[in-house]
Image (tube, grey):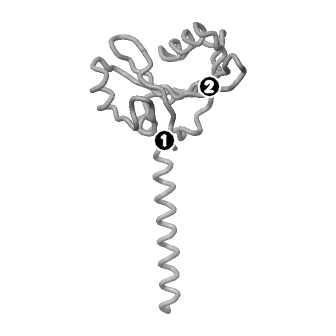
Amino acid sequence: MSRTIRSLLLSVFSLAVILGGYYLIRSMGGGRPAEEKTWTVVDEAYVPRGAVEEFIKADAERQGVLPVQIRNYGRDAKVLGRFRGKQFARPTENVLSMFFKGLDDWTVVDIRYKTESEREAQRTILYVFDGGQWKVGDTGTLQK
């Protein structure tokens, strides 16, 4: 076998191994990426799937902005690392536990709603379960 054919076969084999590894790692990532999470409409008839969604629904009812759309990322450390808020920029779970002494849980949620002037608003909110109740820990955006 000539040297040229051997190096061509080695290049093709290396490319196949790299592509195979990429798709293997990507498939092991589990779940959908944050950008692919679907929006859920929360209105008067919506049955919340957890305490955070109950809090969001009650807060939206109190402010009179129902219906709202939410995208709940849950307790995803990668999403938390992309969060940039007024108080935190790319926080970690350890940073949250230092700031909120009674921190038991946290979640990141995108909320989209219409204002009184019919303008669409979107916010990303970091909710924390601190001292036995859910509350807003910070508001901001998710960076790419």
Residue reaching furthest to the top:
62
Give the residue drawn at x 43%, y 16%. 135
Callout 2: SS: strand
Residue on which the image places disc 2: 112
Residue 2 versus residue 106 in the image, above or below: below
Give the residue drawn at x 49%, y 50%. 26
Kind of residue indicated by mark 1: Gly
Camera-nearest residue between 25 and 66: 66
Residue 129 versus residue 9 in the image, above or below: above
Residue on which the image places disc 1: 30
Identify the mark nearer the N-term, 1 or 2. Answer: 1
Camera-nearest residue between 86 and 5: 86
Q: Quadrant of residue 36?
A: top right
| Side of 89 where 30 appears, left or right | right
Residue reaching furthest to the right:
118
Q: Position of residue 5 (x, y in %)?
A: 52, 87
Q: Position of residue 4 (x, y in %)?
A: 51, 89
Give the residue drawn at x 47%, y 66%. 17
Camera-nearest residue between 70 and 118: 118
Give the residue drawn at x 71%, y 19%. 117
Residue reaching furthest to the bottom:
2
Tell me the crowding category of disc 2: few under 14, some 14 to 19, or many 20 or more residues within 10 angstroms, Cα based.
some
Disc 1 to disc 2, how far (Cα)? 26 Å
Q: Position of residue 56 (x, y in %)?
A: 54, 15
Kind of residue indicated by mark 2: Arg
Q: Name the disc covering residue 71, or none.
A: none
